[in-house]
Image (cartoon, rainbow, N blue to C red):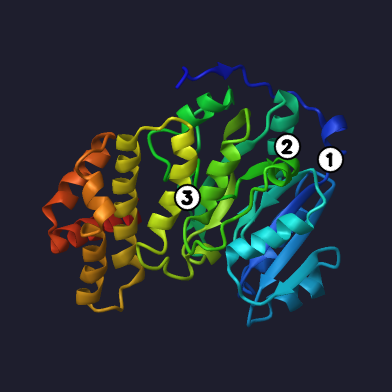
Amino acid sequence: MEKLYLTPYIDNSLKEVVMKKLVSVIIPAYNDADYILDCINSIKKQDYSPLEVIVIDDGSTDCTSDIIKKNFKKVRVISQPNTGVSAARNVGIDEANGEYICFVDADDVISSNMISELVNSIETNQVDFAVCGIYMFNNKHGITKHLPITKKNKIIRGNDCIFNELYPFFDTYKVNAPCGRIYKRNFLSQNKIRFNEQLSFGEDSVFNINYYSVINSCVFKKNELYGYRRGSNYLTKKYSGEFQESKKLRFSAMSVVLREKGVSESFLNGQLIYICFSYFLEIPQKLKKIKLAVRLNLISQVVNDADVRKALKNYSGNLVIKIFAAILKTSNLRLIYFVAVVINYIRRKH
């Protein structure tokens, strides 16, 4: 891969130009009656216009749609049977009219200047994509964690340089989640980029990797402008499923694009090892009420997976991946589970 090339980040105001371009805000919602008011009110407070707001009610059994229709006359609500967040977002893309697309989850909020900051970054620097940092919050403690995407604003040009910037992990916020970013709708349409409705987990990573693969420039902004409500998000209400049905399918879909970018098999194997542990971390966190024997069996499925065993013979990565690989090689299910519990405990404290 070529050397990372950064150009000076420009932050001039182009409101005369920017304000003419419609942004479609797509909100997938499922039983979010407790939070949908906060979400849409944060969008109403944007210092950017014009906007169109499209809510896809994905088979809610509560009064989510009624709340929207009562309080927000200009918000478009599309109701459908429960088919998952990917299908809901795809409907939003198909129905959108804006030149730009912005995804917001129904229980999250955005800062009043998020859309203007991201669109202005695209227009001023003539780039194809803009991403900002996020912060995590909950009602009890307020902001609980800061996740800046970069230490300073940067613009990257050249497709290979963009992928170089995404190393060493493809399992971080730069790739995960479609929120806190602005996409160009014509790139999505022309390249037929949609969320993979067959994936129960990680569909956003595949979507973003596919988008990154067709663009030639992007801006990463240091500002944390997207508020992620921790513990209640639509994407995390359901356990992500068995390893084969979630993490590995996502990894396989991502690998197709990454191999085209010249990524080595040893690097991909390192990513698979990292993804294994991200899966392990979910088990004590989301399956607390399930018997320990069942949780250990889920870990066993991963440890004995043929592709995982093969990856452990030839992998590359940083110290974190090497430590994870060493633990995996022991095949000690209780040790792996214990490490996952400890890491989750440390994360909660920080």
Specify whether residue 147 is in view: no
Q: Work out whether residue 193 or residue 11 is closer to the camera in this orientation and state it.
A: 193
C-beta proximity under 8 Å, tags 3 and 1 = no
> Picture quarter containing residue 211?
top right
Identified by mark 2, the residue type is Val
C-beta proximity under 8 Å, tags 1 and 2 = yes
**Compared with residue 1, is residue 102 higher up or lower down, i.e. above or below?**
below
Q: What element carries label 1?
A: loop
Residue at position x 69%, y 31% in the image: 121
- Ranked by sequence position, the earlier of labels 3 and 1 is 1
Identified by mark 1, the residue type is Lys
Image location (x, y in percent) of residue 176 = 49, 48
Q: Work out whether residue 2 or residue 218 is closer to the camera in this orientation and state it.
A: 2
Residue marked by disc 3: 253
Residue marked by disc 1: 21
Q: Residue 346 carries which label?
A: none
Residue at position x 79%, y 43% in the image: 99
Mark 3 and mark 1: Cα distance apart in space: 33 Å
Image location (x, y in percent) of residue 182 = 67, 42
Q: In this view, does 153 lie to the left or right of 184?
A: left
Q: Nearer the viewer, mark 2 or mark 3?
A: 3
Residue marked by disc 2: 119
The quadrant of the picture occupied by the N terminus is: top left
Q: Is residue 280 left or right of residue 43?
A: left
